[in-house]
Amino acid sequence: MNKIKASIFRKTRLRLIQEEYSSLVNKQVQWKDFSDYSYAHEFDKKRYKLIKGKLEANRKFIDGLIDKYSKERSFEQLNPIDIAILRVIIAELFFAKTASYKILIDEAVEISKRYSTGNSYKYINAVLGSILRKEKFHGINVKV
């Protein structure tokens, strides 16, 4: 995968994460708020629609997984940006299947290091690792 495509894919994930975060914090997505961000303009529209659709269709299930594997805190106590990151990565990994689990876990960790709090990347890595080890999804059988 070349560098340009990777940056477009990350921008697509960031756009989705930002929308999820906005919906958690504001209880609605404010589309006009995204116009000042570079990744709001440059993203893979086909991939965006696929992931967004899978996320919308499986939101309750995804939130249930996050709650189930968040051992230290209940879902309501989680940082909204961590929820947004996990929702998008889980939707992409298990339902949209647009990239390998290694790439997506690395993406989740890198995004959380940049946009979340101190050790959130460890929490996100642990939750995703537990889900991969303990859950079976559409033929994904991963030994982590």
Image (cartoon, rainbow, N blue to C red):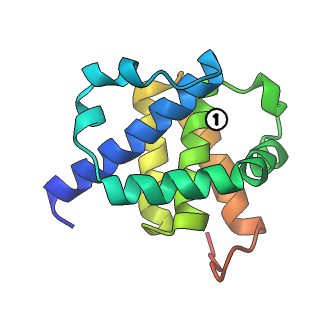
Kind of residue indicated by mark 1: Ile
The answer to whether any part of residue 112 appears in the image is: no
Q: Secondary structure at mark 1?
A: helix
Residue 84 position in % (x across, y down): 58, 36
Against 100, residue 81 (above or below) is above
Residue that mark 1 sits on: 83
Q: How many marks?
A: 1
- Taking the spot 52% from the left edge, 50% from the top edge, the residue there is 52
Q: Residue at x 54, y 37 (%)?
A: 121
**Where in the figure is residue 123, as x and y percent of width and height?**
64, 38
Whether residue 114 appears in this view of the structure is: yes
Farthest-out residue, bottom: 139
Q: Is residue 19 above or below residue 128?
A: above
Rendered location of residue 39, percent (x, y) = 27, 35
Q: On the rendered image, what quadrant is the N terminus found in? A: bottom left
Q: In this image, 76 relative to 124: left or right? A: right
Point out residue 46 in the picture as x, y percentages from the top left corner.
35, 60
Q: In the displayed structure, does residue 12 sit left or right of residue 68?
A: left
Looking at the rendered image, the quarter that the C terminus falls into is: bottom right
Q: Quadrant of residue 95?
A: bottom right
Quarter of the figure with residue 34: top left
Residue ID at (48%, 45%): 108
